[in-house]
Amino acid sequence: MNKDLLSGLVLLLIAALYHRATGAIADSTLSDEVGATGLPRVLAYTLAGLGLLLVVRSLLVARRAGYTADPESQDARLPRAVGFLLFGAAYVAVLPLLGYLVSVALLIAAVTLFERAERPWAVPIVAIGGAALYWAIFVKLLGVHQPVGSVWQALLS
Amino acid sequence: MTAFWDIVHLLTGTPLVFVAIGGLIWGILGGALPGISASITMALILPFTYTMDPAQAVALLACVYIGAEYGGSIPAILIRTPGTNSAAATVLDGYELNRQGRAGEALGISLMSGVVGSLFGLAMLVLLTEPLSWLALAFKPTSYFGLGILGLSVIASMTGGSLVKGLAAAVIGLMIATVGTDPISGVTRFTFGVPDLLSGVEPVLVMVGLFALTELMSQSGSSNFSRLKDPVRIKLPSLAVMNRLKRAQAIGCIFGLFEGLTPGGGGSIAAFMSYNEARRWSKTPEKFGKGSEEGVAAPETANNTVASTTLIPLLSFGIPSSNSTAVLLGGLLMHGLLPGPRLFEQNPQVIDSLYVGSLIAIIAQIGVGIVILPACIWLVNRPRPYQAGFIFALILSGIYTLNNSPFDLGIALALALVGYLMRIAQFPFLPMILGVVLGHMVESSYRRSLVLSGGDHMIFLEDPIAVGLLIASAAFAVYSLSREVRDARAIKLQAVQS
């Protein structure tokens, strides 16, 4: 499917879901002429209009010029990019359990290996060193309360 | 006289010097990393400014911007890969000079031209911003609504590509801005029972997610950059060389000023335009592309001028004209600071700090630029997998410092995925970010206007400023649409002819 056509359909879907969600906004006695739902509904209609425009335009262009597939470079890299992002999601999941120091070391190691580091034997050393550096900066220097890790707390108590 | 003593106090009584030099170093290192633009370098440090004094936080971001513009020229000259988009024009002659064994000279010219451009840009910023901001005193809620719409329309129109996609991105940004508590009635919207969403989605998460994380995702799997093996030392240009370059630098200053004031202009356009004009006005145009000193001086002066002049529309009216100024606006809003005349009246220390911090950074750039070069080369030479791992960990650690909330991390990661999909579908980021940043102003001024008029929309036509701004918004949209149609026809004609 043409990318613009797909984008237009996605915009229509977002507009419909967003408009539906405006129904859940409560009424307020403090409300003004427009109300809390006023602008969101205008935005939903505007986005739907723009989505429709994109759909119509992509259909017209495809019919006139004959559809040719877009270069696949960015698309082909989507699974890899999503894979990269999953390491971030895993970090969010393990952060409260394993704490900052271990989680960030695992994150650096995982991403470095995923990105095909040339000397894999060096990865654990660099990851531990990097985690110690970040821990020193964030926790000790900046005083950020990063999670200690419920697993370690349970083991120590 | 009070202002003078304020500046003396800033120089001696606060750690502004450290903030300015720290920001400059961070900016140069970030800018030197290919793929990490000035806006990403600023977005990376944005979460850390959350707990800082507002005046120092704003100065820090401005100094990062100044540093990144110079930093971008280092890999452009040394490995033919611009560190930032605006350094792309520097590659043309900078790398040629490097091939001729004159890398040190090219870096010196880039550094000093950057200093000239930055000083000129700062002078223009100081001279023009406050007088322009007083215009905003005549603004009513209707005018602010018009201004918000103009900002969105200009950015949606001028970011290149399709107007429809630019506008759609702006609308999605406005939609994100509606999440949280309604500014007038106080009811919650689109929170889906999640307490973390009550205060809305912070613009900083959108910026970090779209700029920094999306870029990392896009670069995933890329190979290492070319390695630099030979040691290089910066050779500062002599007075005679600087005298020879003054025409190219003057051209860079003019285009830097013009493009900085133009919404959607930015350092890249200024750099290429000044490169072309410098060649046209040069006594030795044949040297351009073959290692011309003027070919380095003009674009570097221009993009460094833009780093200051692009702050003029931001500080006067609150309209960011580039990704970097959108991040700076995010920094201002994060500390509850609204650009415009009230910022000059109520928080003069923020403005003084920004000006003085920028001046310190510009002057310090000469020394820091020389000292930091080996560190930049070391950083660029690190294998990409390690760079990716460390930058990803830095971003996630930084986001957590905002509210100590894993929920923020989830939001930023989700926005990164949205950003990647937008990149595939060729939707621009800036209108979306601007929608998030300006959403509150657009909605509250629109609704306040209607409260004043009892629901009559004619109030917008009774305010000449609002009418002017709305007409200008429409004009920008029409211009962009006609340009799009013209480009499409030209492509079609070209296809038929070939």
Image (tube, coloured by chain):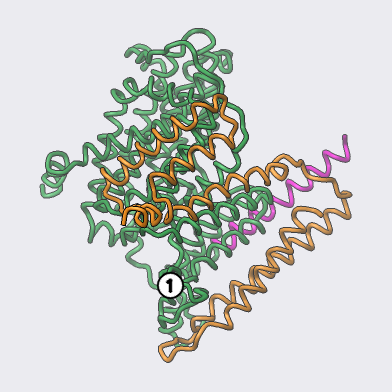
Chain colours: A orange, B green
Element type at marker 1? helix
Quarter of the image with the N terminus of chain A is bottom right
The front one of A67 and B491 is A67
Residue B142 visible within the image: no
Instruction: State which chain disc 1 sits on.
Output: B
User: What residue lies at 49% left-to-right and 84% top-to-bottom?
Assistant: A35
Which stretch appears magenta? B473-498
> Where is residue B11, by image quadrant?
top left
Compared to residue B113, the image places residue B328 above or below, namely below
User: What residue lies at 39% left-to-right and 28% top-to-bottom?
Assistant: B114
Quarter of the image with the C terminus of chain A is bottom left
> Where is residue A20, by image quadrant?
bottom right
Q: Which residue is disc 1 drawn over?
A: B195
Query: Mainly helix, strand or loop, the magenta region?
Result: helix
Residue B121 visible within the image: yes
Query: In screen coordinates, is B139 left or right of A62?
Result: left
Magenta-colored stretch includes residue B474? yes
Compared to residue B200, the image places residue B295 above or below, namely above
On the image, the x and y values in percent for residue B289 come to: 58, 17
User: What residue lies at 68% left-to-right and 55% top-to-bottom?
Assistant: B481
Residue at the limit of the structure toward the top, as seen here: B101
User: What residue lies at 61% left-to-right and 32% top-to-bottom?
Assistant: B222
Q: What residue type is labelled 1?
A: Pro
On the image, the x and y values in percent for residue B451 come to: 42, 84
On the image, the x and y values in percent for residue B229 come to: 49, 13
The front one of B149 and A87 is A87
Query: In screen coordinates, is A56 left or right of B56?
Result: right
On the image, the x and y values in percent for residue B295 come to: 51, 21
Query: In screen coordinates, is A69 left or right of B163?
Result: right
